[in-house]
Image (spheres, rainbow, N blue to C red):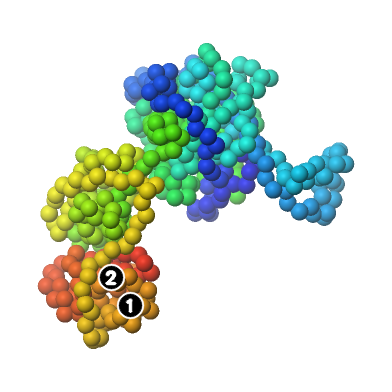
Amino acid sequence: MKPSQKPCLSLIAGCAVLLACPSQPLCAEEVKYADLEKKISVDKNPVAAEGGVVSSYAPALAKVMPAVVTIFSSKSVAAQDRNPQQEELFRRMFPDIPEDFFERQQEGGNRKEEGLGSGVIISADGYILTNNHVVGDADEIKVTLPSDKKKEYVAKVVGADPQTDVALIKIDAMDLPHVVIGDSSLLKIGDVALAVGNPLGLEQTATIGIISAVGRSDVNIIEQGYENFIQTDAAINRGNSGGALVDATGRLIGIPTAIQSNFSGGNIGIGFAIPSNMALNIVQRLLDGGGIVKRGFLGVFLRDLDTNMAKALGQDNTNGVLVAEIGEKTPAEAAGMKPGDLIVGYDGKPVQGMQQLRLDISNTTPGSEVVFEIIRKGKKTDLKVKLGDLEDNQLAASGPSGRPKAPKDADLIEGVMVDELDEETRKSLQADEAVEGVLVKSVKDGAPAAEAGLRPGMIITQIDQSDVTTLDEARKVVEDFKGDVLLLQVYMAGRRDILAVPLKD
């Protein structure tokens, strides 16, 4: 990570996740992944889980360390107004600084901001894998090799993806040492992990730990990004970003990206790396897409299941993802997907949760036809969907249509007073004309519905996965319901959601 940049801080349980802010790629070279693929070394054999005590990992490190480079980046940023008090304090602390130091910082109205990171050579002709936050917003990128630290190579960005924090750069050199890339899908918790990089400017530093977790998608390091991190306790610090995480045989399994830390910013044994499989996938899509990663688009709002929702849907576990809302003129709508559908399978593999499904869809090429396995009203079925292009679509809310009737108060379920939805109320709520249902007038504090998240001003559009447009329809569905947990689809402030309301203790 760049020690000279201000990190984006996200507080998690009293700690902070540290990552320099990502930005857009600089340029893209006209080259296809098929050309680069011929130059990359890949070994997908699993690591032996048993085989005696290892007394040294020097042979493994000897394979990778020559391929881990130092990356210096710089960019021009607007100079801040001078502060005489701060300058005086700085001079007292560092009396040997030049007299014109602060004047030079203001030259041209800009100042130069520099950063230090790491990279991994993946081909003999100079392709280097690193992080977007190391190089993505730089005006100038220079690289030094372990074999010749006095020589600097000027690098250019071939492609960079802020949403996964992967970048590919290239230097003009041949016959370079390069890593062998392993299969990160074979990693197991407890496997040995070695991190190699330039932490805090200390070049060619190696640390050891284990794989602490895989498939971390709940870290929230990259805002609106796609996360599937390897977690490790191998020490990672500022400057390790873009370096190498390798297995016990020296094969590349990940790209160190961020750490969770206390406010000191130092390592506390929780580091995160982009899996090698994911990094290569992004490299392929960057090159084939002309420097842009194209992502599949479904057009829905999703939510994970909790135990109450699972019970209401007749499921004995919380696997799967519930569809809360379908966008108008989206691939989901065209395929016949409906709010309340439970997605349990995607393209032949089970769906565990929302983040995993979102990542799988994003990794699918736009225009692909994929099969969603869904459960609708207790029945399992397959639904074929032709995915759109995320960059070309915007989600629009849609809902059932019908005519509202005259207002009439009613107690729908325990602690919940509802009313018909009239045009005046619709306008006051700024609800779209397509939204139909019954209006929640009040929810008693402590009632099960309140605990589930139901609030006054919400519009109930579905009960037990059935559309409701009048109080009579709503009452009939509730009266006929025989279960313990009732599903309500609600609309508020332009968004739909699904709530699970327990009816019995």
Q: Earlier in the sequence, mark 1 or mark 2?
A: 1
Q: Quadrant of the N terminus?
A: top right
Marks 1,2: beta carbons within 8 A = yes
Q: Residue at x 16, y 56 (%)?
A: 376
Residue under numbered circle 1? 426
Q: Position of residue 504 (x, y in %)?
A: 21, 71
Judged from the image, the secondary structure of the residue bearing numbered disc 1 is helix
Density class for disc 1 (Cα within 10 Å; few <14, some 14-19, many ≥20) is some
Q: Is residue 132 visible?
A: no
Q: Residue at x 41, y 21 (%)?
A: 35
On screen, residue 298 versus residue 175, left or right, reads: left
32 vs 189: above or below: above
Disc 2 residue type (three-letter): Val
Question: In the rendered image of this protein, does residue 486 appear above or below residue 297?
Answer: below
User: Where is residue 473, by image quadrant?
Assistant: bottom left
Q: Is residue 28 above or below residue 350?
A: above
Tag 2: Cα neighbours inside 10 Å, few (<14), some, or many (≥20)?
many
* Residue 338: mark: none
For disc 2, the marked residue is 435
Q: CA distance from mark 1 to mark 2?
A: 9 Å
Q: Nearer the viewer, residue 257 or 234?
A: 257
Residue 478 % position (x, y): 17, 74
Question: Which amino acid type is shown beneath numbered disc 1?
Answer: Arg
Return the residue nearer the eye: 370 or 476: 370
The image position of residue 147, as x and y in percent, is 61, 16
